[in-house]
Amino acid sequence: MSILHDGYFTSGLDGDPELAEALRGEMRRQQDGIELIASENIVSRLVLEAQGSVLTNKTVEGPPYGRYYGGAEFADAIEALAIDRARRLFGCRFANAQPHSGSNANAGVFLGLLKLGDAILSMNVAAGGHISHGHPATLTGRDYKIASYGVNQKTERIDLDDVRDLALRHRPKLIVAGGSAYPRAIDFAGLRAIADEVDALVMVDMAHFAGLVATRLYPDPFPHAHVVTTTTYKSLRGARGGLVLWNDDGLTKKINAGIFPGVQGSVMLHGVAGKAACLGEALRPEFRNYNRAVLDNARALSNALAAAGLRIVTGGTDTSLMLVDLTSRGVTGDVAAAALERAGLAVNKNLLPFDWRPPESPSGLRLSSNAGTTRGLGVGEFQSIGRWIDQVLRSPNDALMILAIRDEVRELCRRHSIY
Ligand SMILES: *Cc1c(COP(=O)(O)O)cnc(C)c1O
């Protein structure tokens, strides 16, 4: 009796037609539509291969060159490569490349550096913060006392006077900056001065602007933050996973223990290889050109939408992402996102600062130039995307018009094929 079915080691997806069909559908979806969701990007063939490699078979625990299991020489080399490249890319002394995700990187840092019940001051989700920074529905929201800052109602930007008042009132042990829907540059030096006043540490979560930091197109968090976290699949255009970066050796043991065994078990080595791959790509000169184009394209899109009469939160962006206020069009974020998806434009609905509507049906959309820039779209194309978005928002129920835009989107995508 055979213990393995035919083709176990030789046939790939042909051996599972049901799964293959869904994957082909996803490939077609990615090829035929324009991805404007800020948490996504399009990885290189190299990153795809690294993440789909035989490393899936290998289990290791602990740091490179200090593993619990044997047979780790190549695992060690791969993880050391990821760490070394992360340190070089961001100009910092230490890195942990093991976090399975951005949320795990944050949870590990909290666990390593804080005590149960310590206070954290972070940005609230309504103002653009991320849920892993202490939202009540997460473990971090249960284990620590969370105080949150927002943005100023007039400027829609972080107001350091407000942050300072909250810090003096709540005496946090950690101040967190960086979010998932904050489009502007953050004053890291200002936050550090506040943290020093109350004897807190500063953590910057740069998931959405790590690529810009790496290429010096955004303020550098490092001289000011004690610890920096990021995902590696958004602006870094790589593996699904996270990174933790820091400079003070006094934090090393605590941070590493917070990640493992604090919040994770064995290493997802295929992901670590994908991180090594994307960090290597980010060290190449082309990555700076890419990030310049990301900024140019984001501004082109934001300007096109503003010229069509849509209000952009804060009036523009310093990053790849922007928030669009739909109030003047009398359409909600959920309805807009569904109509745009029919036109081949993938976006996500998003709360605006001081939004009075619920998260399921908020007043805004979040857009990003990250993925479109990777497939080679330029300023002219992003201006067209702005015009299409404007048209769809004017008549989200006009099926014929949406079909016509769908055709134009498909045609543009054909000229900018992926893989
Ligand atoms: C996306 C994101 C995360 C979470 O990453 P996951 O990989 O989904 O856990 C954390 N922080 C910020 C700021 C993010 O944008």
Image (spheres, grey):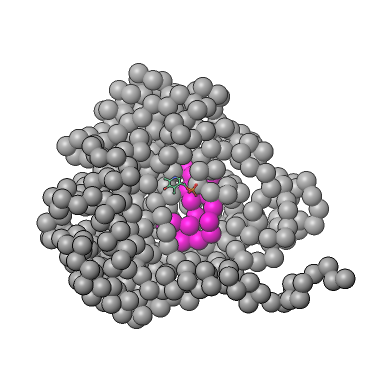
Q: Quadrant of residue 319?
A: bottom left
Lateral position of residue 172 relative to residue 251, left or right:
left
Residue 7 shown left or right of residue 252 in the figure? right
Q: Residue at x 17, y 62 (%)?
A: 395
Q: Position of residue 387 (x, y in %)?
A: 18, 67
Q: Is residue 381 above or below residue 141?
A: below
Asked whether residue 193 appears in the rendered view, the answer is no
At a point 78% along the width and 46% down the height, the residue shown is 68
Q: How many marks?
A: 0
Residue 221 lies, in percent from the top left, at 41, 44
Q: Please tell me which residue lies in front, 370 or 161.
A: 370
In this orientation, which residue lies closer to the viewer: 351 or 19?
19
Is 229 a magenta residue? yes
Magenta segment boundaries in residue numbering? 228-245
Residue 119 sits in which quadrant? top left
Which residue of the protein is positioned furthest toward the right in this rendering? 1
**Residue at the farthest top position:** 169
Q: Residue at x 28, y 77 (%)?
A: 407
Q: Name the residue located 76 percent from the left edge and 56 percent from the top edge.
A: 72
Q: Is residue 282 visible?
A: yes
- Pinpoint residue 364: horizontal percent, then vertical percent: 25, 49
